[in-house]
Structures are given as C-alpha cells and as structure tokens.
Amino acid sequence: MIECAYLEGEALGLAVWGEDEAGPYQTKPYPGQSWQPVGHPVHYPHEYVRTGTAKIMTLFHPATGQVRVKGTVSTKNAILHPWLKAELVAIMDHLPDKEPLVDPAANRAEWERWQVGLKTKFTLPLYTPLGGSWLNMTESVQRILKRRALEGSHPRTGEQIMMHFEMVARHWNTDPTPFIWGGKRLARRHRARQRRLHRLGGSGAYTRRPIRRKWQAA
C-alpha cells in the first residue's frame, strides 16, 4: 500500500508528503567530523548541563526533496495539528491547477486496489504501521538533517537545537535531493517474486507453477 503511494501517487496527480517527529534532542556535545589538525583531536566535555530538549516536526516531499521543518519543545496534538494544518494549506495553495490524469471511476479503482488485503480500510491520510519506520522516507531525511545540524556541535539550549535544524532545512531546500522508493528491500522483493516464477525453455516467458516433465510422475 505505502509502496504504491510512493511509486504511483505522483503519477496519478497526487502530492505525496510524509510526516514524522524526531527527538527529543538534548543540549549535549554531539561528536562528529572536524577540521582539527592531525594529532590534535577536538575534545568534548565529559559533563554537560541539561538545559532542556528540543523536538523536530517534519514534512517531506520525496518527489522533489523539499522539506518543511519546525522546532518545538513538544509534539502533542495541540501543537502538531495546528502546524500540520497551516503547512498543508500552504502546500495546497501552491499546487498547480491541472486536470486529473485519470477519470473518477479509474481513480476509485486505483484507490480500492491499494487497500486490497487490509483488515482495516483507511481514508486519508496513510499511516505507517508501528515498527515500520523504514516505510517512512521522512525518517530518512531526518537522519540526514540531524547529522548536518548537530554533529560536531555543542548546543547550549533547546532553542539552539531548533535553530540549527531549521537553518539546515532551509539550506537543504536550496538544492534538494529527490528520494526514490526502492533500494535493497525492493530488490529482495523482486528476487522473491522471481523465485515464485518458472522459466519456460530459457525464454523470457514464465509460469506461476512448474510444468510437469514427461519423466515426472503424474
């Protein structure tokens, strides 16, 4: 279902955005790469003062790589929902006006196909299951932003952490990298499907079940 949304949503004229919250991030030293001279490594304090934490709310558009980030001290619904509403309204206001790529009946058929096999039918939006973080590409971009925002730094306040994330997100958006669904898991699924097929005489044709040979018992 989620794979179909990533692979087919944009082709059907849908703007597919992912959402996730990250954190809490503490006000502590974050080791990382530095420009220190060889033999003179950077030193981090073994103690730090806990002066608060920060969380990050993220919206991500894999097709373009655009990301929207907001720092906060809490991601409770009272904070998350108003931010999501405002951001989604802004996103919709900037969507191009265009005719649907498919007629309503075909669009409904695609929607039903996405829900085949589900015990609980969904409406909108699509939710990734618990323990399925690898399904949400927003978490992937969050890990990239976290490395760029915090590694090699020692933020002293939660506000500094928020500022670092938001600055990195703005810089990312100047030259965003689109994300494509796939990778090793897609390759494994493809190999598994191939193992369920049986080649015919070395050609490009396959069958779903093996054809009995003459020497095989009936």
Image (cartoon, rainbow, N blue to C red):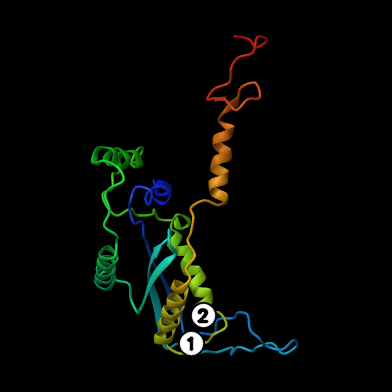
The image shows residue 59 at horizontal and vertical percentages of 37, 66
30 relative to 64 in the view: left or right: right
Q: Nearer the viewer, residue 123 or 182?
A: 182
How far apart, in angstroms, are the residues tagged by discs 1 and 2? 8 Å
Q: Nearer the viewer, residue 197 or 217?
A: 197
Q: Quadrant of the C terminus?
A: top right
Residue drawn 55% across and 52% down?
A: 183
Which of the 4 quarters of the picture holds residue 105?
top left
The crowding category of the residue bearing disc 1, from other C-alpha atoms within 10 Å (few below 14, some 14 to 19, many at least 20), is many
Residue drawn 52% across and 89% down?
A: 48
Residue 84: numbered disc = none
**For the residue labelled by badge 2, is the local secondary structure a helix, a strand or a loop?**
helix
Q: Relative to 170, say whether 66 is above or below.
A: above
Q: Relative to 68, say whether 3 is above or below.
A: above
Which of the 4 quarters of the picture holds residue 63?
bottom left
Q: How many labels, in total?
A: 2
Q: Please, what is the three-letter code of the amino acid marked with disc 1?
A: Pro
* Residues at marks 1 and 2 touching, judged by CB atoms closer than 8 Å: yes
Residue at numbered disc 1 = 155
The image shows residue 153 at horizontal and vertical percentages of 54, 85
The image shows residue 190 at horizontal and vertical percentages of 55, 40
